Image (tube, rainbow, N blue to C red):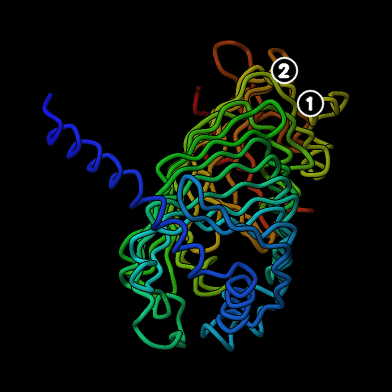
Amino acid sequence: MSRPRLRGLLVGLGVLIAVPVLAMIVGAALVPKEKLAVEIAEQVELATGAQVTPGEASLKVVGGLGLSLNGGRLQGTGAELAKRTGTGQDVERFDIQYSKLKVSLAMLPLLRREVEIKSVRLAGPVADIELADDKIRLNDYDILLTDLTVDLSQGPWPTGEAPGQNLPADLRFDVRGEVAELVQKGMPWQEVHATGEWANKRLEIHSLTAHLADGTVQANGVLDYATDPWGTLSWDARMENLPAGQVLAPYLPDLAEKLSCDLAGNVGGAMKLRDKETRLKTLDLKGDLASGEGVLHAEAWLRDVSHYLGKRQDLKTVNFRQLNHDFAVAEGRYLINTLEIDGLDTDWQASGWLGFTGDLGLRVGVRLPAGFTPDLGGMSFLAETMRDDAGRVNLGLNLSGKLAAPSIGLDLSGLGRKQ
């Protein structure tokens, strides 16, 4: 190789090495870490009304420019958040403690005195969010936003009434999150992992997995502020071996106390998020559930039929081999399309509804043990007309009133019908 060509090659290599190094040095000089940490805290306080303790700042140059805030805290209230952003979205207060807030910056825009954020990572020991009707806690969390783009030169922070009006239309990022424990409505979900993408005022969760006891849920969903500026949420989920008591407790506590089994199934739904009343009114679910062996402690519910059972009061505790259930939620009611229980002593079928306010309207059919005759008082002679070919009486019941203490009446509409 000739000397001029060799010299040219060495110069070229020198330029390739020197320019990035020089850019990092200049970039570091343009971003004094203490000043930037204070400015970030001030901007967050201005945008959210929260009190910010930024923590110790450090600046990384080698491998790309990055600012880290270590050991900080973000505390605020929904009232202040509403003043700055237009709505608190049912948030009463929040307290986020972080061990690391790391912002990675693109180098070349800094040379033009512009800020382009490549990624944001927020990790910490605990984050508490209090809502009007719930408390959410994240223990040992790590959230990473990458490929983040937004134009920060579009003027002051918007203050529309609805959250969607306050979101930059050009904001985009990919998100990945891991939480060791997420407590929501009293349920301690473990090893929560999620991936998704925010674009065009929509957060699409591609994959979410979480564990509860020995059970697992896998889900995907969309949080949409483009269609409705107050927000809509839609999702599909698959459940395996989830404990019925814990899953049902926040929604149907009386049923949760009585049902002991592990549930598997599918559920999909949607709702509008404007406020609690809107969420309950617009919640629309459809799903199916199944269980293996379990117990339904129905003693309190079947108190009014005790006289029918005579010496077989034990039948009010339903030990079953299998449970299958097709359901929906609409207009504040849990709709039981079908519920079939294959019991050791009795078989049950039910349809009707349970209200979120504690009322109910159910039609229940029970297939009693072979040879057993319920005590129907003056109508006991009718029992034989309800006995099937296997020698089992098929008794119909109507349940109404309040779930905690329902009124139960004998349903003779199927009199003489063999099952």
Residue of label 2: 345
Residue of label 1: 315
Tell me the crowding category of disc 2: few under 14, some 14 to 19, or many 20 or more residues within 10 angstroms, Cα based: some
Residue 80, above or below 7: below
User: Residue 6 shows which numbered tag?
Assistant: none
Nearest the eye: 31 or 231: 31
Residue 68, x across and y down, in percent: 61, 57
Please say whether residue 169 is visible from this viewpoint: yes
Q: Are marks 1 and 2 in contact (CB under 8 Å)?
A: yes
Total numbered badges shown on the rendered structure: 2
Residue 327, x across and y down, in percent: 49, 43
Residue 3, x across and y down, in percent: 15, 31
Nearest the eye: 65 or 30: 30
Residue 78, above or below 373: below
Q: On the picture, is 389 further left or further right than 58?
A: left
Please say whether residue 203 is visible from this viewpoint: no
Residue 22, above or below 372: below
Q: Identify residue type, mark 2.
A: Asp
Nearest the eye: 50 or 297: 50
Residue that protrudes farthest toward the right in the picture: 311
CA distance for labels 1 and 2: 7 Å
Tell me the crowding category of disc 1: few under 14, some 14 to 19, or many 20 or more residues within 10 angstroms, Cα based: many
